[in-house]
Image (cartoon, rainbow, N blue to C red):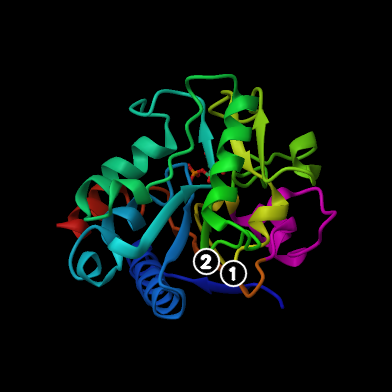
Amino acid sequence: MPPETRHYQTWSRLIQDGASLTVVFANARVAAKGRFSWVLAGGNTPRDLYRLLAQPPFVEQMPWAHSHIFWGDERCVRHDDPQSNFAMAQAAMLAHVPIPKKNVHRLVCESHPPAECARAYERSLSEFFKDETPSFDLLNLGVGSDGHTASLFPRHPALDQKDHWVIDIPRAPAAPKLPRVSLTLPIINQAKVILFLAKGQNKKRRIEEILENSGDPNHPLPAARVKALEKTIWLLHWPAVPGEDSPELQDHFME
Ligand code: 6PG
């Protein structure tokens, strides 16, 4: 099934839809299975979506008590470092919502070598999914202008990793060029629904190339290899002029 792509005139409309999608799907999964497993993306793009989900009406609509949060990748820095994907989600959303601490499955990768952290996170996923096939209900992803997603980069061996769900990247080839830990494609593509958020003219052409080759397991662009079990959705916004939907405008929207 080809991915579903939705284009938005404004960023605020995009994140409204992203929040509504998340709420609807989360509640459907809790009704069906009693829990909702959700993988957060890192980077800057999803921050406004996380903020919106921590505000009315969405904050009251989300089934936080039955939601379990994971990360698609993490930079190997302290949990409170501004470059940490956990720190971003914590500040934007998790610190402001009634989610049980035990349901926040942080990808810890600052205290030990990244390879050990990758194995430890893999064990925690096995414990969570027990004897089920590890299939996240919703998995958020972003995309870089080079076509990377999570911390899977073009021409990097981690992209072809088939034997592990979680892998270490000793030094990311794109900023921030830090040691990282990332989910791999086998477990990413086991997710039921994958939701990409992307904006910016600098990514437009690359994303068009990704969408033309979406689901190709051998394509050089990592994000093109992504294909959810049920539905892959892209929410896209190409600001007409640089700076449109600037943070101030978004902040105004958030008031
Ligand atoms: C990370 C992300 C990465 C991110 C893209 C886009 O840890 O950086 O997992 O894959 O989604 O680099 O980043 P922006 O949203 O900041 O453009």
Q: Which mark is residue 73?
A: none
Quadrant in which the N terminus is drawn: bottom right
Determine the residue positioned at 67% across, 70% down.
Answer: 229
- For mark 1, what is the residue? 192
- For mark 2, what is the residue? 137
Determine the residue positioned at 20% across, 69% down.
Answer: 60
Determine the residue positioned at 56% across, 23% down.
Answer: 178
Q: Position of residue 203 (x, y in %)?
A: 59, 50
Report the Cα–Cα distance between label 1 and label 2: 5 Å
**Looking at this rendering, what residue extends furthest in the left direction?**
255
Which residue type carries mark 1?
Lys
Front position in the image: 190 or 82? 190
Q: Position of residue 90 (x, y in %)?
A: 31, 42
**Looking at this rendering, what residue extends furthest in the right direction?**
218
Quadrant in which the C terminus is drawn: bottom left
Span colored in magenta: 204-227
Which residue type carries mark 2?
Asp
**Looking at this rendering, what residue extends furthest in the front direction?**
131
Q: Is residue 47 above or below residue 170?
A: below
